[in-house]
């Protein structure tokens, strides 16, 4: 009896040999390389099969980069809480002392150093992976002399420092990072999530003024838990911060929150000038819906030297430099936005307020009150 299976096998093998020998593509170690790169027409009595591979230019998606350090419980605990959620895979090798993880459009990067010393992680990630970083988010502890229990969000930079100064916590003198446009929407989302987890009023939910590094080239913000070791280690606070990132970036099929390119029909952006480190008068405005937030310059970031009654005296200090750097960074982070300075009027003496308002007018920077942002 004739073995039809054997005959069919040999016929198929001979056909494949002829196809591969006629293929102009050079040998590749990938077993499917030839099948993917040759146009194959395999004819039988009934059917014609065709496989065709088109060379397409690969477009890398925009990704968000979230950075945490194992040396800080208020940083690694929220990162671990986030990584315990569904969908994570090991990420590309970045450098030997760092681990990376990927989930949809988010890349989590873990290192063991101080959170403020690894400069330009965004640029370095792009060079190693070929991916384009859209924004950078840092997880960190918050310290305060008052030991205030707080969950905070803030932009970064040290625009008030003079050239030659040594920044105490990273960055470089005169520099302000692009503020992440999500800051305003996320502080409101953080308040909502913290309330749902019964962390309010034990924790204050607040913005902080612009301060510290590290250096970045992309829109950046810090998410912090404060202000003592017992609170840095709080798992419920870590879970709230993880939930903020998960919901805020729209992981798990949701819609991300604070997407300027999609939601910028209301284009007014608050540039905060003056007040204390927790910028309470700016916070009053920001807690209203639809307010976007740029840099927040506390009083210490607009240093002004008292002219001591001298008429028309030049007011020294780096306040002009600081305001200009903060404004330019905010403008770059919100393309098409209307940047409006919001002054904490009560925090300034009359000569300071007059000098600042005069400088803002000379720079064509609009000044607004609370109702100008709604």
Image: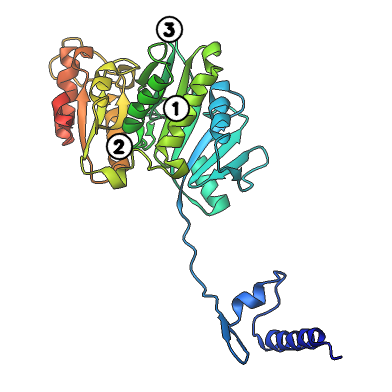
- Numbered badge on residue 330: 2
Count of marks, rendered view: 3
Question: Which quadrant of the structure image shows residue 258?
Answer: top left
Query: At numbered mark 1, what does the secondary structure look like: helix, strand or loop?
Result: strand
- Which residue is rendered at x = 42% and y = 40% of the image? 249
Q: Does any portion of residue 60 appear in the rendered image?
A: yes
From what the image shows, is residue 91 above or below residue 314? below
> Which of the 4 quarters of the picture holds residue 212?
top left
Q: Which mark is residue 42?
A: none
Location of residue 320 in the rendering, given as x and y in whole percent from the top left corner = 26, 28
Which part of the image, by quadrant, shows the C terminus? top left
Ranked by sequence position, the earlier of labels 1 and 2 is 1
Tell me what residue is drawn at x 14 percent, y 26 percent.
371
| Contact between labelled residues 3 and 1, with CB atoms less than 8 Å apart | no
| Residue 369 visible in the shown view | no
Query: Which quarter of the picture shows residue 7?
Result: bottom right
CA gap between label 1 and label 3 equals 19 Å
The answer to whether 143 appears left or right of 372 in the picture is right
Q: Nearer the viewer, residue 21 or 201?
A: 201
* Disc 3 secondary structure class: loop
User: Which quarter of the figure is the N terminus placed in?
Assistant: bottom right
Q: Is residue 277 above or below residue 140?
A: above
Which residue, as the protein is rendered here, is positioned at the far right? 1
User: Counting residues from the N terminus, which is met first, the one under dot 1 or under dot 3?
Assistant: 3
User: Residue 223 got which mark?
Assistant: 1
Disc 2 vs disc 3: Cβ atoms closer than 8 Å? no
In this view, which residue lies farthest toward the front?
1
Q: Is residue 267 left or right of residue 301?
A: left
Foreground: 103 or 132? 103
- Numbered label attached to residue 146: 3
Kindly give the residue lying farthest to the top in the view shown: 146
């Amino acid at each position: 009896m004739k073995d039809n299976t054997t005959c069919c096998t040999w016929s198929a093998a001979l056909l494949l040999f002829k196809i591969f020998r006629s293929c102009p593509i050079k040998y590749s170690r990938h077993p499917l390389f030839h099948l993917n790169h040759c146009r194959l027409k395999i004819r039988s009595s009934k059917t014609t099969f065709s496989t065709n591979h088109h060379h397409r230019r690969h477009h890398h998606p925009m990704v968000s980069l979230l950075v945490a350090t194992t040396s800080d419980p208020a940083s690694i605990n929220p990162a671990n809480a986030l990584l315990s959620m569904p969908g994570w895979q090991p990420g590309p090798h970045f450098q030997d002392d760092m681990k990376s993880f990927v989930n949809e459009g988010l890349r989590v990067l873990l290192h063991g150093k101080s959170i403020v010393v690894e400069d330009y992680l965004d640029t370095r990630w792009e060079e190693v992976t070929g991916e384009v970083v859209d924004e950078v988010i840092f997880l960190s502890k918050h310290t305060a002399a008052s030991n205030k229990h707080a969950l905070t969000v803030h932009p970064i930079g040290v625009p008030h420092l003079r050239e030659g100064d040594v920044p105490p916590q990273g960055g470089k003198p005169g520099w302000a990072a692009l503020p992440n446009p999500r800051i305003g929407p996320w502080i409101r989302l953080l308040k909502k999530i913290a309330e749902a987890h019964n962390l309010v009023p034990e924790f204050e939910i607040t913005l902080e003024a612009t301060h510290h590094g590290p250096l970045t080239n992309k829109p950046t913000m810090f998410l912090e838990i404060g202000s003592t070791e017992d609170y840095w280690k709080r798992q419920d606070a870590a879970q709230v911060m993880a939930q903020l990132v998960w919901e805020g970036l729209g992981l798990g099929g949701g819609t991300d929150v604070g997407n300027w390119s999609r939601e910028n029909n209301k284009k007014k952006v608050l540039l905060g000038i003056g007040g204390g480190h927790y910028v309470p008068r700016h916070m009053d405005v920001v807690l209203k819906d639809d307010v976007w937030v740029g840099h927040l310059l506390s009083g210490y970031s607009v240093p002004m030297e008292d002219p001591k009654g001298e008429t028309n005296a030049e007011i020294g200090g780096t306040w002009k430099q600081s305001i200009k750097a903060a404004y330019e960074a905010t403008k770059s982070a919100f393309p098409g936005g209307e940047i409006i300075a919001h002054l904490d009027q009560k925090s300034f003496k009359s000569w300071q307020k007059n000098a600042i308002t005069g400088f803002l007018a000379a720079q064509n920077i609009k000044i607004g009150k609370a109702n100008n942002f709604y």
